[in-house]
Image: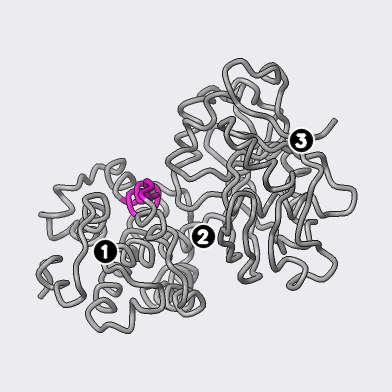
Amino acid sequence: MTRIHILGLGNLGRFYAHALATTPNPTPITLLLHRKSLLKEWEEAGHRIEIEGASTLVPGVPSSSSGYDIEVLDASSTEKAKPIQYLIIATKAPKTVEALKLIAHRLNYKSTIFFTQNGLGTIEDVTKEYFNEPKILPSYLAAVTSHGVYSTGPFRSVLAGLANVTIGHVCLPESGPPRNEAQNLLQKITSAPLLNALAVSPKELKILQLQKLVINATINPLSVVFRRKNGDLFNHKLIYELLRIMLSEFSQFFEDHLRSHLDLDLSDEEFKECFSVESLERLVLSVAHKTAKNTSSMLQDVQAGRDTEIDYINGWFDRQCNASGTNRQDLADDPQHGYMRCNSHLVDMVKSGKVISGDEIRREFSLQ
């Protein structure tokens, strides 16, 4: 029987589970719990997932759902021999490889893995760790999720704003054409009214992922080092100037790497529309305005003492530079390759926990 497993039950995991469970004739869903203590929280939640606001924003979709199957992941699990056909991964990016450890052997070339996380690099890490031979490589889907969801407790979230999901196939050099199994899961996602999902080509998906990466690589870490809500960032003159410098770095990076290392061939007009400084600025400022009252996910992680996803957001740019033969020292010292200097310094600041005021920007980033 076709079944969807969901790993990671934070806001995104709950949201996808609820959206799929409330479709007509839903596919059976198994929630994968990574620790036994979550069973008590599941019982206290009444064996339900609650997404407050769902029924208001999408008439006909209830705000709570039940009927899920539960599996606790441990080394002695009785389910360990059963293959997993469809897996939705909604863990934080840095936790994904470790989270898959107990179920990777249940995934194979007939499986489809749908990655929902922020940032880039998770798919490559998972492939290297568990599926490094084409004959065992699952099909991959990925998405850019724009809905605003925040938590109010275990298995309870609020849908603060209805937006959309953009989903598509991920084509790696070692993978063949998309399989029917992957297409089936994609159709289930796009058929869920609450998700408001649109399927796009691999090229379109990659463009959207890179644009979303820039949005996250500016708003998230800047909110951390300046301790500001999204809407309070760019009305400060010097923070806005820093944003412009970062966007220049990212735009130059894309110009240098899209074809050679990211396998994305764009015309000059397409590049200008998608990755010019002006285009990227419009995207970032639009999201900052729409989420003005929000605390960024990275700042929430810092305030809660959790690891951030900085290595899969800003750190992704550093890794791509290293792969192309440009290391961090070059970025700092070589005028011809200095376009990632502010980004690299911001990574160090977030990791070290350094907080500054807007007036300290010029000194901290060695700006004129």
Q: Quadrant of the N terminus?
A: top right
Can you identify the residue that label 1 sits on?
225
Q: Residue at x 70, y 41 (%)?
A: 43
310 or 337, nearer to the observer = 310
User: Around disc 2, counting alpha carbons within 10 Å, would you say few (fewer than 14), some (14 to 19), or many (20 or more)?
Assistant: some
Element assignment for label 3: strand
Q: Is residue 48 above or below residue 253?
A: above
User: Around disc 1, counting alpha carbons within 10 Å, would you say few (fewer than 14), some (14 to 19), or many (20 or more)?
Assistant: some
Q: CA distance from mark 2 to mark 3?
A: 36 Å
How far from the left and from the top, in percent, is residue 264?
A: 48, 53
Q: Nearer the viewer, mark 2 or mark 1?
A: 1
Q: Nearer the viewer, mark 3 or mark 1?
A: 3
How far from the left and from the top, in percent, is residue 32?
A: 64, 34
Earlier-in-chain disc, 3 versus 1: 3
Task: Name which residue type carries label 3.
Answer: Asp
How far from the left and from the top, in percent, is residue 169?
A: 64, 46
Can you identify the residue that label 2 sits on?
207
Q: Residue at x 66, y 58 (%)?
A: 200
Earlier-in-chain disc, 2 versus 1: 2
Task: Name which residue type carries label 1.
Answer: Val
